Amino acid sequence: MKYLVNSIILIFLLSAFNVKANEPATSSDTAFQAGIDYKIINPAWSTDSEKTVIYEFFSYMCPGCNAFEPHMENLEKKTSEQQEIVRVPVSFYKQWEPHAKAYYALKMMGELDKAHKPLFAAIHQYKKPLRTLEDIGQWLSTSFGIDKDAFISTAKSFAVDSQIRKANQMVKAMGIGGVPRLVVEGKYMPDFDQLKTADNIIEATLYLANK
């Protein structure tokens, strides 16, 4: 329940972000301090990547994650070639697991780019009851011509199960208590509540990625 409450709170915070998006940054916005503006994760999670990794922990079922998606697009535009965003779908609730599996299945099938944003919209804007892999598979087939049986088979595969287990390990190791959350290099976690606006969150994330 606490995750749902956190998501509802984040919707109100992110609504405020939209109002403040065009406000100029002040000198205080750039004075990011460990223990105040961001948490240091110790021990850090090994990214096993030559690039600087920015993890986004999210769920398609999370209203706050849906509200934060436009800001993730903004972050993507501002990352360099030496940086990469890695999305990690969480399964805090059993009801969220089909959507985490859907993310990994679509990624493995090379269909993620076309379905990622529309899946958020289908759930939150159009209120489609996409609760099971069968529901999601039918929607993907109707909306994008993605083979339903191939999708469901991939979503139920050992490869996807392995990704789900790894995601669960990452959530535990990095102390992810709610979503959306960002973690830079498996070590730095911007504090959404302290940073208050989307501009500050993105700026702090890029600052940490460039450390």
Image (tube, grey):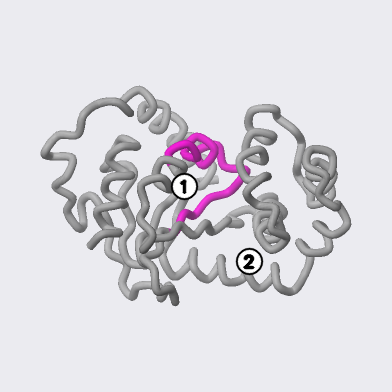
Residue, disc 1: 180
Name the residue rendered at 63%, 53% in the picture.
93
Q: Is residue 2 visible?
A: yes
Q: Who is closer to the viewer here, 16 or 109?
A: 109
**Picture quarter with the C terminus:** bottom left
Q: Is mark 1 on a helix, strand or loop?
A: loop
Task: Please tell me how crowded label 1 is: few (under 14), some (14-19), or many (20+) other residues with Cα within 10 Å.
Answer: many
Name the residue rendered at 70%, 67% in the picture.
160
Q: Is residue 128 magenta?
A: no
Q: Residue furthest left?
A: 27
Residue 113 placement, left or right of 136? left
Q: What stretch is highlighted in magenta?
A: 55-71
**Picture quarter with the N terminus:** top right
Q: Residue 121 carries which label?
A: none
List x then y, in percent, for residue 123. 67, 36
Of the two numbered discs 1 and 2 on the same chain, state the one appearing first in sequence.
Answer: 2
Residue 121 placement, left or right of 36? right
Name the residue rendered at 64%, 28% in the picture.
125
Q: Is residue 61 magenta?
A: yes
Q: What residue type is labelled 2?
A: Ile
Task: Please tell me how crowded label 2 is: few (under 14), some (14-19), or many (20+) other residues with Cα within 10 Å.
Answer: many
List x then y, in percent, for residue 5. 49, 39
Question: What is the quadrant of residue 88 in the picture?
Answer: bottom right
Q: Which amino acid does label 1 sit on?
A: Pro
List x then y, in percent, for residue 131. 75, 44
Q: Is mark 2 on a helix, strand or loop?
A: helix
Residue, disc 2: 164
**Mark 1 → mark 2, Cα distance in angstroms:** 17 Å
Residue 121 placement, left or right of 52? right
